[in-house]
Amino acid sequence: MQRRRYYSFIVGLVLILVAGCGPSPFTTGATPEDTAAQHVFRQTPPGETYGFTTLYTYEFEDFAVVFHDKPHTDAAQTVYYEIVHRNQTGWYTKECCDSGGGSLLKMTGLGDLVRVTTSKSLEPMFVYGRTLSPDVATVEVEFDTGETISDQPTEGFFFVLSEKGRNACTIRLYSEQNSVLAETPVSRGDSCSQADGEKD
């Protein structure tokens, strides 16, 4: 009898642990921007000033990336993002892993032309930032898949995404005359080395 109670206790404990490890409730909304704003509000610690101003939204088939700033931050040097997903009922965010951002970095090799950083999540992989010079007409990123994707900055902001890539390997900046202004490696990881070897 006692053994049966012991087994019941173990089973009950396992069920509680499994329930505790399940997915957290989603934040939902009518639009990507509204969903992202609600998610940021829910994540704001008590006593901390809440603020959300949408900067740019890039919408795809089943997800969107919403860039925004926060109170008391310089949007020219600091940008945050929320990845918002879409299903048959509308937009939603997960409770973890789909938020990121922070300070944009000056990269060696790009001089004073841009500030740039990359997403922290593996999928999708994207590069974003701000141009610091009107001479930059196009930002091109080469990924470890071998694909090269470019964007023309909007109000100085650019966003380049690869749904298959794991690493951004090289960034190139072009002028309006399509001449290369600057070029620098972003990552020297194994996947980028393999991509370089395949091109050779």
Image (cartoon, rainbow, N blue to C red):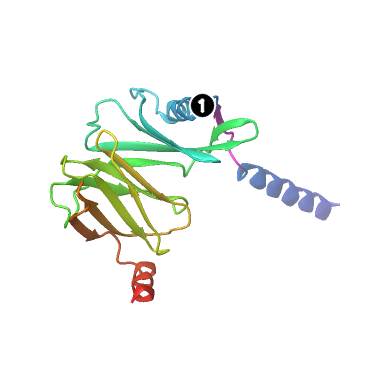
In the image, which residues are magenta?
23-28
For image coordinates 28% across by 59% down, the residue present is: 186
Q: Can residue 139 be seen in this view?
A: yes
Query: Is 168 on the left or on the right of 174, as rendered?
Result: right
On the image, the x and y values in percent for residue 90 come to 60, 30
Callout 1 amino acid: Thr
For image coordinates 35% across by 76% down, the residue present is: 197
For image coordinates 38% across by 49% down, the residue present is: 126
Query: Is 182 on the left or on the right of 190, as rendered?
Result: left
Q: Mark 1 points at which residue?
A: 31
Q: Quick check: is 49 in the magenta stretch?
A: no
On the image, the x and y values in percent for residue 87 come to 61, 37
At mark 1, the secondary structure is loop
In the image shown, does 75 or 96 lie closer to the viewer? Answer: 75
Query: Is 47 on the left or on the right of 184, as rendered?
Result: right
Q: Is residue 193 above or below residue 183?
A: below
Q: Which residue lies furthest to the left in this view?
A: 112
The quarter of the picture where residue 171 lies is bottom left
